[in-house]
Image (cartoon, helix red, strand yellow):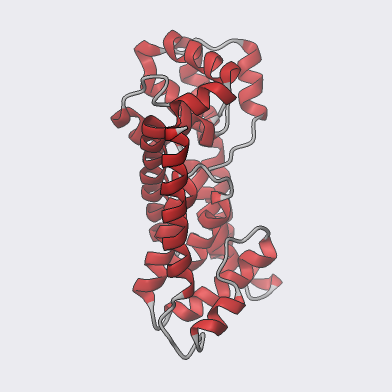
């Protein structure tokens, strides 16, 4: 019970801190009073409509309080990643809308890696017994695959990020149980999720700049869409060339990888 209570205390403290950040907003002409800001949309978006509304509000607010919006975004992202809460894809899209395609990509890659490492550390301190108790079959399968690929562990971790045989949040939780070195874990997240982050951030950047259907057919937008399509093809090409020779993967797990849904 002690690990669970400790985890709940950490979660409660971080939740309260994020609540204060999202409600005690500095006043500004774009949002008015803090109460008006709370009433508008400072919550985690759950669909595209809420995401677009939140993006519009924060872009306006950012004109006067750029540093605060940056702090709020980073805190929300690390909160979701650190506690393995699904839905980070919405924040990736939001990053593209708020910070642009390249700064947004850099920010998401760094925050994804740092947040996943926080989840790794929390699991190492508080969650090992809980993960093994609630997901024994998944842990056993992943343990077997990790041991089979121990000699090429970093590339296997990249494979899991590009084509996950299990959701990313579960890999973050189970990594310390599998004795995956934290340095390899960090860089596998940083590199392995670049294509996914790129697609989400570029999508947010495109959506934030579209003012009409005519803008959809502009040269700049067409170039961005082409770049997204090309990046989406890169992981499959790399893995196809590498996995057949160096990774121990059976046909069943390969099919499962391709059909698994990515969620960070």
Task: Name the residue located 59 percent from the left edge and 59 percent from the top edge.
Answer: 222
Q: Is residue 191 above or below residue 128?
A: below
Q: Is residue 119 above or below residue 100?
A: above
In the image, farthest residue toward the front: 1
In the image, farthest residue toward the left: 183
Viewer can see residue 194? no
Task: Name the residue located 49 percent from the left edge and 61 percent from the top edge.
Answer: 96
Give the number of callouts. 0
Front residue of 136/172: it is 136
Q: Is residue 223 above or below residue 24?
A: above
27 lies left or right of 51: left
Front residue of 2/156: it is 2
Task: Name the residue located 42 percent from the left edge and 71 percent from the top edge.
Answer: 69
Position of residue 169 measured from the top left corner of the image (x, y, whole percent): 52, 36
Q: Quadrant of residue 187?
A: top left
Position of residue 73 measured from the top left corner of the image (x, y, whole percent): 44, 62
99 lies left or right of 207: left
Q: Is residue 54 above or below residue 8?
A: below
Task: Name the residue located 48 percent from the left edge and 14 percent from the top edge.
Answer: 143
Front residue of 50/33: it is 33
Position of residue 80 measured from the top left corner of the image (x, y, whole percent): 49, 50
Viewer can see residue 102? yes
Q: Quadrant of residue 102?
A: bottom left
Position of residue 30 measured from the top left corner of the image (x, y, whole percent): 50, 87
């Amino acid at each position: 019970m002690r690990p669970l209570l400790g985890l709940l205390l950490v979660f409660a403290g971080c939740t309260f801190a994020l609540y204060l950040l999202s409600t005690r907003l500095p006043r500004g002409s774009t949002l008015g009073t803090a109460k008006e800001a709370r009433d508008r949309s400072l919550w985690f978006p759950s669909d595209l409509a809420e995401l677009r509304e939140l993006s519009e509000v924060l872009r306006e607010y950012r004109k006067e309080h750029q540093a605060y919006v940056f702090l709020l975004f980073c805190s929300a992202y690390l909160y979701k990643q650190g506690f393995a809460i699904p839905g980070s894809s919405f924040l990736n899209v939001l990053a593209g809308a708020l910070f642009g395609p390249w700064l947004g990509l850099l920010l998401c890659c760094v925050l994804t890696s740092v947040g996943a490492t926080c989840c790794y550390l929390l699991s190492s301190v508080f969650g090992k017994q809980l993960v093994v108790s609630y997901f024994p079959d998944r842990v056993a399968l992943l343990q077997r695959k990790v041991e089979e690929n121990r000699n090429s562990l970093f590339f296997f971790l990249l494979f899991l990020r590009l084509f996950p045989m299990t959701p990313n949040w579960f890999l973050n939780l189970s990594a310390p149980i599998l004795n995956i070195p934290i340095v390899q874990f960090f860089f596998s997240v940083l590199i392995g999720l670049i294509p996914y982050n790129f697609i989400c951030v570029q999508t947010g950047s495109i959506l934030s700049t579209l003012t009409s259907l005519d803008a959809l057919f502009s040269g700049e937008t067409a170039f961005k869409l082409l770049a997204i399509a090309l990046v989406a093809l890169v992981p499959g090409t790399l893995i196809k060339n590498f996995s057949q020779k160096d990774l121990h993967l059976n046909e069943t797990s390969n099919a499962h990888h391709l059909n698994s849904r990515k969620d960070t």
